[in-house]
Image (spheres, grey):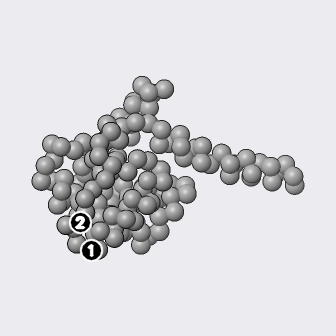
Amino acid sequence: MHKGLKMMALAVLAMPLTMMAQSNVNLPQDKGPDKINVSAYPADQQKGYKVFVDKCAKCHTIARPINTTMTKPEWERYVKRMMHKPNSGISDAQGKTIFEFLAYDQENRKDKNASAFFKSLSDEEIEKLKAQQH
């Protein structure tokens, strides 16, 4: 029984290290601005921004999604994917709020000046960056 408890304790302790390892790649987006002035956004989107920052900054730089441009379906898939990451702590309602904020921001800020932002990278492109940085 002690061996089982010891293994569980090690697994729990190793989990944050595993999560850090997932986010330790530096993407071009990570070097951009890490805040958005949302004062002109509708009140519900300002609240969504707070949820977005609180939840998404747990696993990667907040600059990453702020400086990435995606289509609405891509944002939807991305948020769902992040919700299923271990320990994301993103509920269905929070995921919906985050998606709605990202879709609004995409349409009202990024689409108006798309060349100022980075296209999202494929998993393969991210893996190549990881390999180059280690």
Q: Say which residue appears at 36% left-offset and 37% top-offset.
A: 27
Which element is circle 2 on?
loop
Residue 124 placement: quadrant: top left
Q: Is residue 103 visible?
A: no
Q: Amino acid at mark 1?
A: Ala
Circle 1 residue? 43
Whether residue 63 is situated above or below residue 109 in the rendered picture: above
Circle 2 residue? 39
Q: Report the front residue among 23 and 53.
A: 53
Q: Residue 126, how many percent across, how many down?
A: 39, 36
Q: Residue 76, how many percent across, how many down?
A: 32, 60
Q: Say which residue appears at 33% left-offset and 68% top-offset.
A: 48
Q: Say which residue appears at 27% left-offset and 74% top-offset.
A: 43
| Label 1, residues with CA under 10 Å away: few <14, some 14-19, many ≥20 | few
Q: Is residue 41 visible?
A: yes
Q: Residue 121, how many percent across, how many down?
A: 32, 41
Residue 122 placement, left or right of 111: right
Q: CA distance from mark 1 to mark 2?
A: 9 Å
Q: Say which residue appears at 40% left-offset and 36% top-offset.
A: 26
Q: Nearer the viewer, mark 1 or mark 2?
A: 2
Q: Amino acid at mark 2?
A: Ser
Which residue sits furthest left?
112
Q: Residue 127, how many percent across, how many down?
A: 42, 34
Whether residue 23 is situated above or below residue 108 in the rendered picture: above
Which element is circle 1 on?
helix
Q: Are marks 1 and 2 in contact (CB under 8 Å)?
A: no
| Label 2, residues with CA under 10 Å away: few <14, some 14-19, many ≥20 | few
Say how many tags the image has: 2
